[in-house]
Image: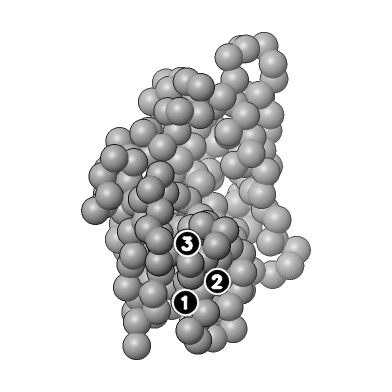
Amino acid sequence: MALEVCTKAAVGVPDALGDCPFTQRVLLTLEEKKVPYKLHLIDVSNKPQWFMEANPEGKVPCVKFDGKWTPDSDVITQILEEKYPEPSLVTPPEYSSVGSNIFSSFVKFLKSKDASDGSEQALVDELKALEDHLKEHGPYVNGENVSAVDLSLAPKLYHLVVALGHFKEWSIPKDLTYVNSYVELLFARESFLKTKPEKKEYVIAGWAPKVNG
């Protein structure tokens, strides 16, 4: 029995998987655990009536467990770990916050119009902290095996690479060799290739209003 999953459709392309990193995190978890699922692509600018009735907050991702729709990627991935414990994706508590400030630092730098506001350096500092961790514990955050924290970071790092490359012609510094290797490792996983937005343009279109607004 396939789990039903509501996901964001691409901006202006309602029949293509969109650019939501939190949705991809859920899909990555399903793929890594080999849980069958069925996608409902939701046009977030014109949400269907049935979706709003099932999920009044209107948030994606949203997964149907035991007849009830559950939003929030944190909650969903926790339920998936409990319901489908093999393979385990549990990250040890002491590593669970590794890289947790990278996404907010990326967004701040992406939206920044002031080159001297320190937002670029703040992002580099967060990436350096990840570099130091991977150097000691890699190749993944918890060593040899992928875990939940990697599946949370992978889509966010993809957005960082695509959006900063497009809007700021910026890339992860080459001297952060462990981070660059980590990114390559994550992006090459079969689960990632199956669940990433179909085109980089969908990621760019998703960020454009926030950058230009």
For marks 2 and 3, give the CA distance: 13 Å
Q: Residue pushed farthest right?
A: 94
Label 2: element kind: strand
Q: Which mark is residue 52?
A: 3
Q: Position of residue 36 (x, y in %)?
A: 34, 79
56 or 17, nearer to the observer:
56
Does dot 3 land on a helix, a strand or a loop? helix
**Above-or-below relation of 65 to 41:** below
In the image, taking residue 19 as reference, residue 25 lies left or right, namely right
Residue drawn at point x = 50 percent, y = 86 percent: 66
Q: Are marks 1 and 2 in contact (CB under 8 Å)?
A: yes
Q: Is residue 129 visible?
A: yes
Q: Can residue 142 be seen here?
A: no
Mark 2 is on which residue type?
Thr
Q: Which residue is mark 2?
A: 70
Q: Which residue is labeled 1 in the image?
A: 64
Query: What residue is shown at x 47% (from left), y 51% (from top)?
Result: 21
